[in-house]
Amino acid sequence: MMRNAGLLGAAALALSAVTLSGVIAAKDAEPLQVSDIAVATQKFPRALSEFGFFSDAAGQVPVPGVVPYQLNTPLFSDGADKLRFVYIPGGASAVAGDENEVLAFPVGSALIKTFAFGEGEDRRLIETRVLLHRADGWLALPYRWNAEQTDAKLALAGGRLDLTTPAGEAISYRIPNKNQCKECHGVEGAVVPIGPKARNLSHDWLARQVAHGRLDFVPANAGTMPQWGAGDSAEAEAAARAYLDVNCAHCHRPGATASNSGLDLRWEQGDPMKLGIMKRPVAAGRGSGGLDFDVVPGQPDQSILLHRMKSAEPGVAMPELGRATIDPEGVAAVERWIVELGQ
């Protein structure tokens, strides 16, 4: 008994020493934080983990300073769930300048968007796209998650993988390459963010950023775009215009990749012709479906815009990138708007 007691006592002392050393190590350990070097200066970090955005990568738990956000009307991407975060370096803040443009984030900022399919234990992270604001402008980089869901590796050449959407459709999902990122994020030859505009962010979220010193003020148009999924409670025009702004206007606007179409589908555009109403397409081809006008009031089946939204065929489908399936909710919203235009 005395011998066993001695062994137990020694074990207890050893355990106490280990516990004490662990406490001391925890106290001495620096808190998790973003690598400002990786964000602002490191050329092409090879792994998402090098940025230090997450304390739990698989769970998408951000470290302090990386702030989750949601858009009122999000981009449709084959039903993928998108987890969005913004990082602004300590001591800096974003500027709410032009209310029709994205918040002006300071150099050293990062916008992070992870695409995932499935729920709960079945959720799989597919890719994370990052926009890094560096001294010479914004840089867009795609990262592909590994099968173990422990990290995502830089995918400059993009990639494809087979998966099933929440609607049960089997698709070949495309991760864009670095140059394809520019097709959606390009304005006047420069890469720019396209999502976090005050009108598409909640007033409460913006107010919290002001309170924490990450934004200078809350713009008057905060949260004016409707919450997607509101159904018939959202006015037909507001729902459709918000959808077109988010899904189409990054290309169909002055200075962007599809500016030669003559369409300007931004939320603030008020010219009916630029919205496609009774406007003939610049170039007729199979994408027009043999139809004459982009939008015909009261006649969705005669409107090229809706014809292309309802197609998944390459060369016809719009948007050209970012989806392999048809968005029934988006089609329904735009169709309702076109019908009401004729009333």
Image: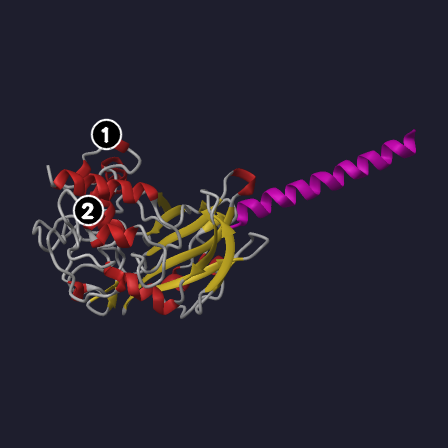
Q: Quick one: label 2, few (<14), some, or many (20+) residues within 10 Å?
A: some
State the quadrant of the N terminus: top right
Residue 64 % position (x, y): 41, 46
Q: Is residue 304 above or below residue 228?
A: below
**Front-lying residue, 31 or 4:** 31
**How was this image coloured?**
secondary structure
Q: Which range of residues does the magenta coloring cover?
A: 1-29
State the image quarter where residue 330 is shown. top left
Disc 2/disc 1 C-alpha distance (Å): 32 Å
Instruction: Tell me the quarter of the picture where residue 190 sits.
Output: bottom left
- Left or right relative to 114: residue 151: right
Element carrying mark 2: loop
Q: Classify the position of the C terminus by image quarter.
A: top left
- Which mark is on residue 233? 1
Graded by Cα atoms within 10 Å as few (under 14), some (14 to 19) or many (20 or more), the crowding at tag 1 reads few
Q: Residue at x 38, y 58 (%)?
A: 130
Across and down, in percent, residue 5 comes to: 86, 31
Left or right, residue 186 beside residue 85: left
The residue at which mark 2 appears reads as: 216
Identify which amino acid the numbered label 2 is placed on. Answer: Asp
| Helix, strand or loop for the magenta stretch, by majority | helix
Q: Is residue 111 left or right of residue 288?
A: right
Q: Position of residue 8 (x, y in %)?
A: 82, 34
**Residue 10 falls within the magenta-colored stretch:** yes
Amino acid at the residue labelled 1: Ser
- Residue 231 in percent (x, y) is at 28, 33
Please tell me whether mark 1 sits on a helix, a strand or a loop. Answer: helix
Which numbered mark, 2 or 1, is in the foreground of this view?
1
Mark identifier at residue 85: none
